[in-house]
Image: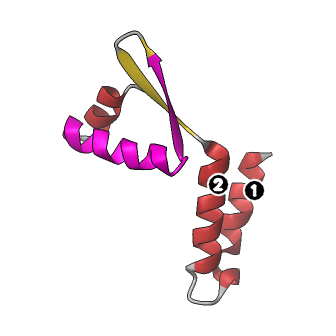
């Protein structure tokens, strides 16, 4: 999705969206590809699933079983 489209859909200023996309790009959560004058961004699904799994496992107040249904859903979507 083009950066401008993302900012429009999320109702975020383009310069703010650009800064946020830059952070996501540096973290490896998205990749970009220039198509003419447009830069398109694509989610790195594998990295995002890893991040979500980590957050769900580590951020459940020491009770990862509380997040197990969500973790299982993420794993099923990957297959």
Q: Which residue is mark 2?
A: 49
Query: How many labels were placed on the picture?
Result: 2
Q: Which residues are magenta?
A: 12-34
Choose top left, top right, bottom left or bottom right for residue 35: top left
From the viewer's perspective, tell me whether residue 21 is left or right of residue 60: left
Q: Which residue is mark 1?
A: 75
Q: How is the image coloured?
A: secondary structure
Residue 37 drawn at (x, y percent): 34, 12
In the picture as drawn, the residue positioned furthest to the top comes out as 36
Q: Is residue 64 visible?
A: yes
Which of labels 1 and 2 is toward the front? Answer: 2
From the viewer's perspective, tell me whether residue 46 is left or right of residue 30: right
In the picture as drawn, the residue positioned furthest to the front comes out as 26
Asked if residue 28 is among those painted magenta in the image, a careful observer would answer yes
Q: Is residue 25 above or below residue 75?
A: above
Choose top left, top right, bottom left or bottom right for residue 5: top left
For the residue labelled by badge 1, is the local secondary structure a helix, a strand or a loop? helix
Distance between mark 1 and mark 2 Cα atoms: 8 Å
Asked if residue 9 is among those painted magenta in the image, a careful observer would answer no
Asked whether the beta carbons under mark 1 and mark 2 sit within 8 Å of each other, the answer is yes
Q: Which mark is residue 45?
A: none
In the picture as drawn, the residue positioned furthest to the right comes out as 79
Residue 51 drawn at (x, y percent): 59, 60
Residue 64 drawn at (x, y percent): 67, 82
State the residue at coordinates (74%, 63%): 72
- Mark 1 or mark 2: name the one nearer the start of the chain: 2
Q: Is residue 1 above or below residue 64?
A: above
């Amino acid at each position: 999705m083009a950066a401008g489209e993302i900012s429009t859909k999320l109702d975020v200023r383009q310069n703010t969206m650009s800064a946020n996309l830059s952070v996501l790009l540096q973290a490896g959560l998205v990749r970009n590809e220039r198509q003419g004058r447009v830069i398109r961004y694509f989610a790195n699904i594998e990295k995002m699933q890893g991040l979500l799994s980590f957050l769900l496992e580590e951020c459940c107040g020491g009770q990862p079983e509380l997040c197990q249904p969500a973790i299982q859903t993420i794993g099923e979507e990957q297959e």
